[in-house]
């Protein structure tokens, strides 16, 4: 609150002072950047806190914040480049988290901003990574990976940036089904932090490396002894982390420990299905399918269905796996543009009372994510009544299911969209 009051004071003093000296122009640029970021952050305040925030005069608007950041960029002041990073990151990353679409006008502004950045900061790691994400969002993965590797050259001595670069490289490898290369990239994340004695995110990336190796064992000709050695190294790291006197592990690390407990004893157990677990993470946590090229999506779909048929033949397909397959197929088909086919697969599942009762009892994330995908599809198709009906079904599942934190913000944003559309 105190920081907000100071920024508001800065805003009042600086907003109308352009052209009155360099110092005041700098103050205006800082005010624009600060107010833009504050408006965006404030727009994510949970609804039950809004009355308290308004009592203290805290008002925010996401669109106003984005417009203010863009104004800061276009004025070319001292803080324009920082505002540009914040604005571009929101368009390329945050909108995928909130479930918003990047419009053609947004892409046009992104292209303009990144062209400016390329001319003024040709070796900036931040802008190079944002440029890579820009092409990734356009599903031009070859160009995105090339720009990503160019950025990687400059981050070797910075642990956090090394982690980010290797992590993103691992996701590209996952999308391309390059399992061993993905394992090595995630392993590099682990050691980037271990060398600096950091603990957070080590269980998470070690677990991602582990399941990548388990999938590589099934689908590649990599030397088995090498795979076994790397697998055991990841298991040892996860075991050591699990016994550390640390309670405030991140949600990603909690996922890492869950994968560890699932695969630590017997990775050959037919009840386990590594590729399906990877796909679930790619869809629910990482949203990889939103930027993967059509060929990549088809490869995953073919592999998934082939393994499903094999498990049906041997009667080893569990209900959890059947539901997870429905989510994976629905999400992949949506991203291939086959919307009606996706709905024909999702609807029988989410309209099955036994499945919904099972979801309520087990607190799993799959049915909630599936309901959200269907609600989002109906909203995009301007079928507001169906979108609201599926959101009501989703909310009837409560808030204590696993991964609720990943869906909550998407639900709030979609609910606001539906409310605005209805009022219009």
Image (spheres, rainbow, N blue to C red):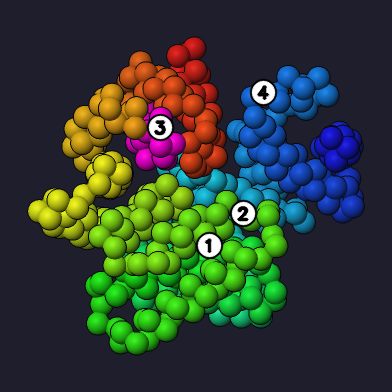
For marks 2 and 3 on the same chain, the one whose residue lies earlier in the sequence: 2
Q: Splitting the image into 4 quarters, where does residue 67 fall?
A: top right
| Secondary element at image label 3 | helix
Read off the residue under disc 3: 361
- Tell me where the magenta segment starts and ends, as one range: 359-377
Read off the residue under disc 4: 48
Q: Main secondary structure of the magenta part?
A: helix
For marks 3 and 4 on the same chain, the one whose residue lies earlier in the sequence: 4
At a point 25% along the width and 72% down the height, the residue shown is 218
The front one of 83 and 62 is 62
Horizontal side, residue 37 vs residue 219: left or right: right
The front one of 15 and 360 is 360
Residue 204: which numbered mark, if any?
1
For marks 2 and 4 on the same chain, the one whose residue lies earlier in the sequence: 4
At a point 44% along the width and 26% down the height, the residue shown is 397
Instruction: Report if residue 409 lies within the magenta region.
Output: no
């Amino acid at each position: 609150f105190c920081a907000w009051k100071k920024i508001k004071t800065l805003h009042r003093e600086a907003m109308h002072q352009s052209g009155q000296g360099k110092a005041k122009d700098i103050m205006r640029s800082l005010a624009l950047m600060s107010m833009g970021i504050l408006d965006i952050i404030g727009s994510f305040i949970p609804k039950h806190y809004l009355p308290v925030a308004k009592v203290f005069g805290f008002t925010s608007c996401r669109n106003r914040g984005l417009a203010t950041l863009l104004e800061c960029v276009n004025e070319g002041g001292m803080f324009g480049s920082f505002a540009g990073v914040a604005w571009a990151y929101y368009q390329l990353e945050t909108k995928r988290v909130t479930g918003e679409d990047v419009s053609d006008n947004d892409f046009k502004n992104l292209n303009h901003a990144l062209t400016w950045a390329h001319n003024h900061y040709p070796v900036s790691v931040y802008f190079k990574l944002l440029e890579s994400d820009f092409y990734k969002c356009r599903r031009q993965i070859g160009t995105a990976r090339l720009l990503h590797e160019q950025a990687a050259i400059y981050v070797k001595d910075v642990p956090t940036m090394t982690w980010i670069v290797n992590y993103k490289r691992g996701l590209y490898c996952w999308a391309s089904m390059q399992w061993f290369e993905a394992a090595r990239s995630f392993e590099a994340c682990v050691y980037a932090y271990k060398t600096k004695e950091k603990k957070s995110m080590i269980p998470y990336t070690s677990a991602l490396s582990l399941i990548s190796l388990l999938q590589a064992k099934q689908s590649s000709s990599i030397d088995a002894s090498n795979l076994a050695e790397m697998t055991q190294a990841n298991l040892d790291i996860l075991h050591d982390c699990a016994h550390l006197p640390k309670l405030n592990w991140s949600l990603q690390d909690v996922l890492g420990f869950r994968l560890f407990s699932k695969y630590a004893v017997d990775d050959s157990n037919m009840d386990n299905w590594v590729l399906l677990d990877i796909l679930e993470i790619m869809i629910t946590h990482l949203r990889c399918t939103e930027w993967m090229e059509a060929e990549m999506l088809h490869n995953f779909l073919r592999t998934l269905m082939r393994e499903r048929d094999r498990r049906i033949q041997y009667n080893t397909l569990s209900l959890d796996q059947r539901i997870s397959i429905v989510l994976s197929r629905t999400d992949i088909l949506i991203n291939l543009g086959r919307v009606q086919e996706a709905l024909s697969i999702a609807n029988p599942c989410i309209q099955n009372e036994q499945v919904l009762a099972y979801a309520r009892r087990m607190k799993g994330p799959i049915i909630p994510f599936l309901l959200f995908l269907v609600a989002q599809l109906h909203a995009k198709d301007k079928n507001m009544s169906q979108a609201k009906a599926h959101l009501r079904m989703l909310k009837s599942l409560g808030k204590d299911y696993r991964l609720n934190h990943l869906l909550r913000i998407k639900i709030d944003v979609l609910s606001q969209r539906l409310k605005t559309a209805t009022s219009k």
